[in-house]
Each structure stands twice: as structure tokens, then as C-alpha cells.
Amino acid sequence: LGGLKGGTVEVKFSHLGQDKTHAWIAQELEVSSPGKAVRRFAVTMLAAQGKAGWQVVAWHWAVPVRDDVAEKVAILGTKPGATPIQNKPIADKDLDKAVREAFGSRKGFADARSERDDGFNFGSGPQERIIGGAKVKTIFGKLRAEIKLHDNAAYILGVSGTVGVALVNADFTHKTRAATDMTQTFRVLAVLLKEGSEWKIVLTQWSHGGPIRG
């Protein structure tokens, strides 16, 4: 981004949560460059503080897509599928169990959320932001939808052993405007924090698995 000739990067929204040497960040960036349309990105990341200072250790970039546009291409069968995630076992079995339970059902996802004020959730559409862990828990607890792990999960474990990142493909089944069930597979980045003896989710971003052109 720094190499854009004559271009600009403007932060339109930013959210920050932190626990000691780790921080989870959500931003909306507006990127412009000469001769091209302005682009809007939803970005989440986990940063860690080390000897070299703060560095990003996990990133998720996505272009927000309106729900009606995503539903339309899904019905037409032209929605791209998410690239399968290869099974990569992690030594921390409790973290693996927590992620699989969180993405095993909608209730499991709501139950897995930390109630920290700096918790956050990015949806796949424009302006779909939920700030505060308790609010995320409440909203997902009431959704008329279901969540299921699509395939596997990949992990990064923080050096402190109390922060983890999971990358999953998750099936989200909901009612369309025509009152029919629709299942879409989303790519999800989740940051988890160990609260006592339990792993809890503090940040999630849901995005589509490939470019959608409506």
C-alpha cells in the first residue's frame, strides 16, 4: 500500500483490543489510486509485541459485499467456493476443542464469545460491525441461523500461550427473503484469548471465499 503512486490510504473505521503483548485490530480502509475506482476493504489483524516492536502476525483482508448481492450469486450458482483448509494439528488441544465447539453451532459460537468490552465482530457486508463481546454474544444468540464447521481449522499460537488465531471455513445457514434455507460458506478469522482455563473469542471477521461480482 505504501508503494501506491499518487494513491492514498484512509482509515474510515478502527477498533483496537489489547491484552499485554498482543492486540487485535479491526479497520475499514479506503484505498484510492489514479485512474482506478476507490476501493473499500475490511481488515482484521493480530499484532504481537516483540524485540523488534509491534508486528502483525495474522491478517484478514476482504471486500464487503451486500447480502442481497451475495445471495443472488449463490442462487445462480456462480458464488466462488472457499479454498479448503488443510488440517494442521496444534499441540494445544484445548484451543482446538474450543474452536471446533465454537463453530459447531450458532449457540456454540455465542457461548464461546468473551464478554470483554473490546471484543469485535466484522460481518461480510458493508457496515456490519458489532462492538463489545457481550453484544456479539447477545446478537448471535438470537439469530435465526445455524453455524457449522465446513472442513478444518488452521492455527497460530501466540508466544505467551494465551492468545491464538484460528482460520476456518464455516457454513452459515439462514432464511432468504423468500423464506427458504440458504447455506453459504464463509472464511472466518478468529482471535481467541485464554480467560482463566477457557479459550474465548475476542475478534472475528466473516468474508466470502472469493471475488463476487454482482
Image (cartoon, rainbow, N blue to C red):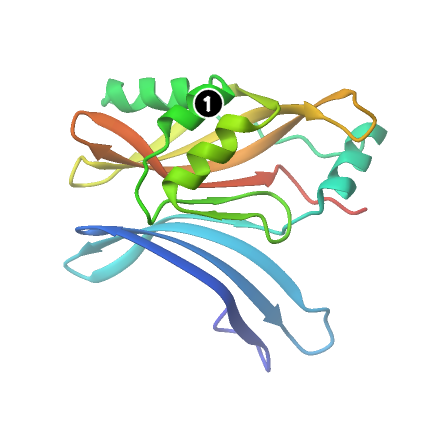
- The location of residue 197, given as percent across then percent down, is 17, 25
Residue sitting at 78 percent across and 43 percent down? 69
Q: Count residues near mark 1 (Cα–Cα under 10 Å), then give few for <14, some for 14-19, many for 20+.
A: many
- Which quadrant of the figure has residue 42? bottom right
Residue 187 lies, with reference to residue 28, above or below; the image says above
Residue 83 lies, with reference to residue 46, above or below; the image says above
- Does residue 164 appear to the left or right of 137 in the view shown? left
- The location of residue 109, given as percent across then percent down, is 44, 26
Residue sitting at 47 percent across and 17 percent down? 104
Residue 13 lies, with reference to residue 118, above or below; the image says below
Q: Nearer the viewer, residue 35 or 60?
A: 60
Residue that lies at the very extreme toward the bottom in this rendered image:
6
Residue sitting at 78 percent across and 47 percent down? 213
Q: Nearer the viewer, residue 52 or 109?
A: 109
Residue sitting at 20 percent across and 62 percent down? 53
- The location of residue 188, given as percent across then percent down, is 50, 35
Query: What amino acid type should be assigned to the residue bearing mark 1?
Result: Phe
- Does residue 131 appear to the left or right of 169 in the view shown? left
Count of number-bearing discs: 1
- Does residue 11 appear to the left or right of 171 in the view shown? left
Say what secondary structure mark 1 lies in.
Answer: loop
- The location of residue 26, given as percent across then percent down, is 44, 54
Residue assigned mark 1: 103
Residue 35 lies, with reference to residue 103, above or below; the image says below
- Does residue 84 appear to the left or right of 67 in the view shown? left
